[in-house]
Amino acid sequence: MQERNLETHAAKPRRTFLGLISSILMATGLAGGYGYFASIAVRFLYPNGRNKAKWQFVGNLDQIRMGESLPFQTPSGSKIVVARQSEGNSAEDFIALSSVCPHLGCAVHWESQNDRFFCPCHNGAFDASGKPTEGPPAAANQSLTRFPLMVENGLLFIEISSETISSQQKA
């Protein structure tokens, strides 16, 4: 009879210990799961600013002559056309437009003889400022995306936002 009492007394601390350990492990797992969910929610609600715009070097002002364009590719692979619209040396004398048609994402190119950007996919056309003039882009009033430019010490820079770049690549 006394042996049974010893086993019962020994089993109680062991059960208490195992219950405590399993409770701690369960609480740790729940805390980890909720913590992971909270970190995703916080990143979604408060983005960390990775999509800030950056100025990138395009070229020297004398590289682009009046009426000509210079192809530019961002580090992420988006293609942009930079063209000189007048003889001045300020940012307003240049224009930077996406070379991706907003209609279906085809590549547009500059036709100097027609003074327009042309998309061969569905005969879409855009004037020198990127506004649609013909084809499906004109019907839907879809302009080419325009990018800000800056001139500093005879050098031309373009402002690229990674958010804009990613949306251009999806188009």
Image (cartoon, rainbow, N blue to C red):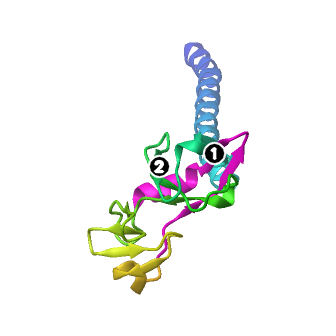
Pointer 2: residues within 10 angstroms few (<14), some, or many (20+)? some
Please give the label number shown on residue 70.
Answer: 2
The reply to whether discs 2 and 1 touch (Cβ–Cβ < 8 Å) is no
Instruction: Describe residue 156's horizontal placement relative to residue 71 as left or right.
Output: right
Please give the label number shown on residue 17.
Answer: none
Residue tagged 1: 156
- The magenta stretch spans which residues? 142-171
Q: Is residue 50 among the parts visible in the rendering?
A: no
Q: 34 or 82: nearer the eye?
A: 82
* Residue 144 at x, y percent in the picture: 48, 68
Q: Is residue 59 among the parts visible in the rendering?
A: yes
How far apart marks 2 and 1 lie (CA) works out to: 11 Å
Residue at 39 percent of width and 63 percent of height: 112
Instruction: Describe residue 134's horizontal placement relative to residue 57 as left or right.
Output: left
Q: 167 or 69: nearer the eye?
A: 69
Pointer 1: residues within 10 angstroms few (<14), some, or many (20+)? many
Q: 114 or 100: nearer the eye?
A: 114
Residue at 63 percent of width and 24 percent of height: 17
Q: Image height check: is 102 above or below 49?
A: below
* Residue 42 at x, y percent in the picture: 68, 50
**In the rendered image, which quarter is residue 90 located in?**
bottom right
Q: Image height check: is 36 above or below 11?
A: below
Residue at 41 percent of width and 58 percent of height: 170
Instruction: Describe residue 91's horizontal placement relative to residue 139 as left or right.
Output: right
The kind of residue tagged 1 is: Leu
